[in-house]
Image (cartoon, grey):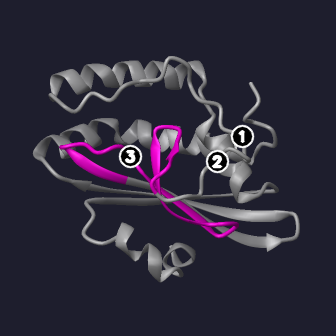
Amino acid sequence: MNQVKKYNELEIYFQDVDHFDIKTIQGSVGLRQFISGMLSYYPWWIVTLYRIREVLVKLLDLVKHEKPEILPLITPEDLSFTPGENASFFIVRDAKEETYWVSETPEDRHLKAYFGVVVEKQSKNCSRFHVFTSVKYIHWTGSVYFNLIRPFHHLVVSRMMRAGVTPLTYKR
């Protein structure tokens, strides 16, 4: 937590939130490759979870976002660090090369969620990546929705992180 809180400019992503978690992993890749590997990780079981999510969206009358025809493959070179631009289905909110990257889920009426990564250099060939998620409920359906998906959230983020530290995971 200290590594993430070290950057005062990131404080806005932790204030008045209903859920906050940080997961940490070490690897020998750079920040761009780590995030690209995470965002390009689509095993069959995650695709299945997204299909199940569609049922929750209908049941709770949540905003239905367009899903891509083809799941995006993001290379480190194509990963945006520009606030306001898209990175997969996330919107970049703040980024600093080889330091941190923060994104937001598309606008919803039930919750607001941020997903970010802070890198901590351990040695020339090793970095520690601190991945955080912060969620603010906007409507009662936000709490219901997030608490239903919370166990899967932890599993998905952990597996995405493992994909992120595996070199060349963005190639399928």
- Secondary structure beneath dot 1 equals loop
Asked if residue 90 lies in the magenta stretch, the reply is: yes
Q: Could you tell me residue 163's position as x and y percent?
A: 69, 40
Q: Which residues are magenta?
A: 84-113
Q: Identify the secondary structure beneath mark 3.
A: loop
Q: Residue at x 28, y 42 (%)?
A: 146
Q: Residue at x 69, y 45 (%)?
A: 164
Q: Are marks 2 and 1 in contact (CB under 8 Å)?
A: yes
Q: Is residue 153 left or right of residue 107?
A: right
Type of the residue with mark 1: Thr
- Residue 74 vs 11, above or below: the answer is above
Query: Looking at the picture, which amino acid does disc 3 mark?
Result: Thr
The stretch drawn in magenta includes residue 123: no
Q: Residue at x 53, y 81 (%)?
A: 6
At horizontal 63% and vertical 34% (from top left) the residue drawn is 40
**Disc 3 target residue:** 105
Residue bearing mark 2: 79
Characterize the local packing of mark 3: few (<14), some (14-19) or many (20 or more) Cα atoms within 10 angstroms: some
In the image, is residue 86 above or below residue 63?
below
- Mark pair 1, 3: CA separation: 20 Å
- In the image, what residue type sits under mark 2? Leu
Residue under pointer 1: 75
Q: State which tag comes first along the sequence, 2 or 3.
A: 2
Instruction: Out of 146 and 69, give the one closest to the viewer.
Output: 69
Cα–Cα gap, marks 2 and 1: 6 Å
- Residue 162 appears anywhere in the view: no
